[in-house]
Amino acid sequence: MLGAIILAPLVGAAILGLFGKRMGERLIGLIACSTVAVSAILSFYLFFKHHAELEQGQKFYEYLFTWISVGTFRADASLLLDSLSAVYILFITFVAFWIHVFATGYMRGDTGYWRFFAYMNFFMFSMLTLVLADNFLMMFVGWEGVGLCSYLLIGYYFTKDFANDAAKKAFIVNRIGDFGFALGVMLLFLKAGTIFYFDDPDRGIHGAFSWAFSQAHDPLAWSAIFAGGMTTIAILLFVGATGKSAQLPLYVWLPDAMAGPTPVSALIHAATMVTAGVYMVARASSIYTHAPTAMLIMAVIGAATALFAATIGLAQWDIKKVLAYSTISQLGYMFLACGVGAFGAGIFHVFTHAFFKALLFLGAGSVIIGMHHEQDMKRMGGLKKYMPVTFATMFVGWLAISGVPFLSGFFSKDEILYRSFITDGLPEPWPVILWGVGAFTALITAVYMTRLMVMTFWGKARFGDAHDAGAHGGHGEEHGHGGLPRESPRSMVLPLVVLAAGAIFAGYLGVPEGLSGGKLPNYFEHFLEPSIARSKVPSGDAQANGSPHSPSGETTIHGAVVQGSAEVEDHSLERMLTGVSIIIALAGIGMGWVWFGRKPLWEPPSLLEHKYYVDEVYDATVIQPIKVGAINVLWKFIDVRIIDGFVNGAGQLAGLVGGGLRHLQSGLARSYVAVVVLGALLIIGYFVMR
Amino acid sequence: MGQEKVLFIVFAVIAIASALNILLQRNPLYSALSLIGTLLALSALYVTLRAEFIAAVQIVVYAGAIMVLFIFVIMLLNVPKDQPQVEKQKGLRYLAIPFAGLMIAEMFYVLRPIRLSTLPPVPSGNAEQAVGTTWSIGTSLFTDYLLPFEVTSVLILMAVVGAMVLARREGD
Amino acid sequence: MVPLSWYLGLSALLFTIGAVGVFIKRNAITIFLSIELMLNAVNLTFVSLSGFFGDVGGQLFVFIVMTVAAAEAAVGLAIIISIFRNRESLNVDEVDTLKL
């Protein structure tokens, strides 16, 4: 049945790809949404049916066929359902379904309607393959597949140059990351002898993670990175995650990817594809826990990215760009979580982020449609009374991402910050620094999101005369009503409401124990435990059902954290930090409200507005040299002179030799005789000499 | 016995001198006559080798028929003296000496091990049936070597037909 | 007694002279004569070996060779006559239309 989950969208993609051109919009939309619905229903069914076994750590395999089996290398096309993948397929299919529904309304009237949904379904197939794979090679297939679909969908408006450029940029930058990922998998195979995740005695395979557990921990040192051991593998895999999940330095494609239609941004670049990196890291958690250097690097990059992107988000005018940088920033939080060993918290943030970020993007899409494809916030304002439902749902999303208590974002973000603070897998100043960066970023997050809301929904309407001359997007529209913005149709509004509900309630699945005083168990983390390795960090709850983990007794005590002396004490620290988070969130909202309420069109520093000139720097240092090198060296020298030289030279050589040899055929009998005699002499001479 | 060596040397010299003369003469008629001389000298050498039948056949067939044919053709064609006419690839003539030298060197190199063998003594017994007599050749020809004999006759037939066809004028 | 090697050496000399004649001379008939000389040199070899080993096969072979030489001379001269009719010249160097 796992196979059906992946194959339903594939079938949908095939049907739409082959026959979609002749179908009407309603049929296309129906097919596309129903295949995703099938996947979603099956995912929910499997989850609830096997919920208890998954929690115990049981794994369900579905073996399709043996793909490659050469020597000791084996890679199967087979699927794995364990607690981690079960959680992922749940929210992926659920959120994707509502986004598909939204898109049936958003893309209405576009001539490439069928193409869009074919690509979206194919994307679902790839993403589900990525998540449900049971070995790294299958995962890589899905990984590449989502990269491909990202390219196809970003470049959906292929008649626009900037869309094509953005698509190429996304694909190429992703490729750089994929290179690291592939190297990491190869190195893993070299060391572990297998690329499957877990052992499966029925098929006679060993898992890489069992190998990982049997290894000693790598030291926390720079040298470990290049030693070719666990740390190297972890770093290489992380490079792949950096590309796919838009961290420093490979994040540059994500803001440009906003050139695609908004549902694409919501699905791929908020809820699913970009979280593939986090999934991969969590999946390979046993490798990472044995490589503390890699975890430190991951945490630092995650925190740095979070801060960096948040500051840029503060300075953008395009509503989608703000959300893009917000996504990068939140992804940074997820990697920060993984880096400090709180993999479960990271996945939890993925889960809640999927809801509220998809909600925010779809809401932005609704706004854009309502504003006749206007994306510049400078020309918005006061939309509250024109688009009330959109406003209400985005209100929820805004509070969630800012970390306001009792909404989902609060629980997940707070958990990450707490875990960063108390981690003892990292040397001394780091935990506090990371917490500090994370907290400051949370402040800025609240500020820029408030700015977005204020500029869009409150205040004076700025879209007066600029409205009619508003920029038109790439797709044709039937909402031809010249005049005031209007609320979007029901197909678009309903998903917003559903996702808003999710944004509110999803957080309660993972309430940290500290906050609830032990009364409400952290369902989420308990469920994930069997699939995720535990690092040396002792987390708040001391349960360990069936997860192999390194002995935590040998942790050294750093800083102010007292190792689990009393449950009560841990919780008090947690509560204190939570209080700090709440204050930060409210302060940020307040600051934003006041500042931007007064001056919505505040000019940000040009450094931020130009994204720290990173793209320009990349262009100058990487792209131009490559271009110059390619033109002058590879083309003019190697291709024209050497390769063409060889080929033409061979031709000329043949000509020369022929020209020389032709003199042998003089037509003269005498010379022929001479040659014959010479030949005879040589042969006789050979035999005589023997 | 020195006599035989003297005989050999005499006829050998004649043969070589005549052979060289073929090359030295400009008029092909004189060249043909020189060849006849060589043939006669060779015939004499055959006699010293106790191949009487072959010696006789050489004179009758080779010198008597083939060379006559040659001379008929030379005279028929009335070819004038070998004037210095068109010569292409003049360098070829200078190759002669190296080639000749090389050839002789190789052949003498091969001959070194057998320098001192001599002719076996005359076998006693029926002199009329010794090797080299007409009788011996005749019997071998019609018993052991019958097939080559028949094939040769076919060959001659082909040659006759071929010569007739080739030498015919168009429209005859 | 005359050693065998003398006969063979003589044969070699005659053969060489014939071979040299073939590619020095330009007159077609003279070339032909040189070829006949070569054939005779080989005949000498056969006969001398036949005599020294008492095997009649050598002489028989000479017999056959002579026959073949006759046939060849007939046909070859016929060809020369045809060429002469076409070109009015026996110079071998002029018959080089097969050159590249």
Image: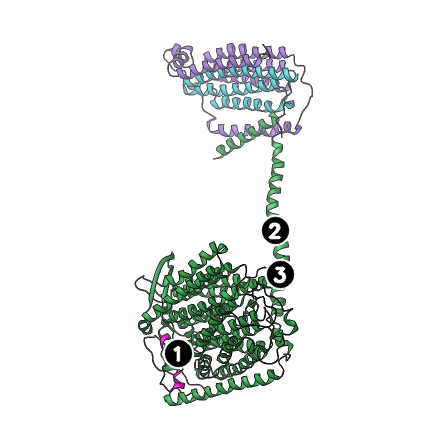
Chain colours: A green, B purple, C cyan
Marked residue nearer the N-terminal end (3 or 2):
3
Q: Position of residue A311 (x, y in %)?
A: 57, 78
Q: Is residue A61 left or right of residue B98?
A: left
Q: Position of residue A498 (x, y in %)?
A: 45, 73
Q: Quadrant of residue B140?
A: top left
Instruction: Looking at the picture, tell me which residue is in the foreground, A572 or A652.
Output: A572
Q: Which residues, given as a range, are shown in magenta?
A: A510-527
Q: Nearer the viewer, mark 1 or mark 3?
A: 1
Whether tag 3 and tag 2 are in contact, CB under 8 A, the answer is no
Q: Residue beneath label 1, please?
A: A509
Discs 1 and 2 share one subunit: yes
Chain ID, mark 3: A
Q: Residue beneath label 2, please?
A: A642
- Dot 3: element: helix
Chain ID, mark 2: A
Residue A153 in view (yes/no): yes
